[in-house]
Image: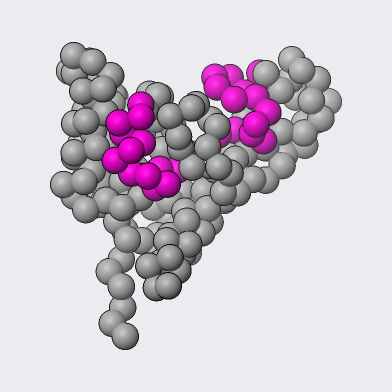
Amino acid sequence: MENSPVPLLGVLISGRGSNLRALIGAVREGRLRARIRVVISNRTDAAGLAFAREAGIETLVMSHRDSPTLEAYDDVLAAALTDRGVTLVCLAGFMRVLGPGFCGAFPDAILNIHPSLLPAFPGLHPQRQALEAGAKVSGATVHLVTAAVDAGPIVLQESVPIHEGDTEASLAARILEVEHRIYSEAVQRVLDRGRRAVLR
């Protein structure tokens, strides 16, 4: 049997791109058997764009402000990914809510990583939410993206204890270490699941 083509990933970012950098490292080390085809940011000043360029990955800046509606932005974003043969989309600090049209273009093929143990503390500032709630444990969750924010099926989670005296920043830093480790593992799980479905 011939080897299947290497899956092509599209990574969407808005900022520093630390999870993007972790995914690039996982590909280089062979822990993630895929190729990052394109990195797209909605912000021109996203630091993660430099990581992608240094790795020889195509980058695009597609500002949501250039589209008249959220639906129109979703359409052009989906088209850019589809045109490049992307089969799995990875959100890595992409600070835009994706609508039903985009989710429909990549059914069960959009992943996001969130710094809490979903369904606890969805949305913005989850570390602050955890501390204000007096939680003893937080963590990171990789989940499939649906039109409902932070509500898609969970692929992988790992807990992080909350220490006495933790601040939002200190908790976020410890969770980020976990994010960097589990995101590539979750991506590979989804790719393997898709490959098994094709082979059946």
**Residue 14 pos. (x, y %):** 36, 28
In the image as oriented, which residue stretches furthest toward the bottom?
1
Residue at 64 percent of width and 45 percent of height: 157
Which color scheme did the rendering employ for the protein?
A: one colour
- Magenta residues, start to end: 99-128
Position of the C terminus, as image quadrant, is: bottom left
| Quadrant housing residue 195 | bottom left
| Quadrant housing residue 50 | top left
**Residue 18 pos. (x, y %):** 45, 39
Residue at 39 percent of width and 73 percent of height: 199
Horizontal relation, residue 26 to residue 69: left or right = right
**Residue 12 pos. (x, y %):** 34, 37
Q: Is residue 68 visible?
A: yes
Residue at 71 percent of width and 42 percent of height: 159
Towards the viewer: 34 or 178: 34
**Residue 137 pos. (x, y %):** 77, 33
Residue 1 to residue 145: above or below: below
Position of the N terminus, as image quadrant, is: bottom left
Answer whether residue 97 is magenta in the image.
no
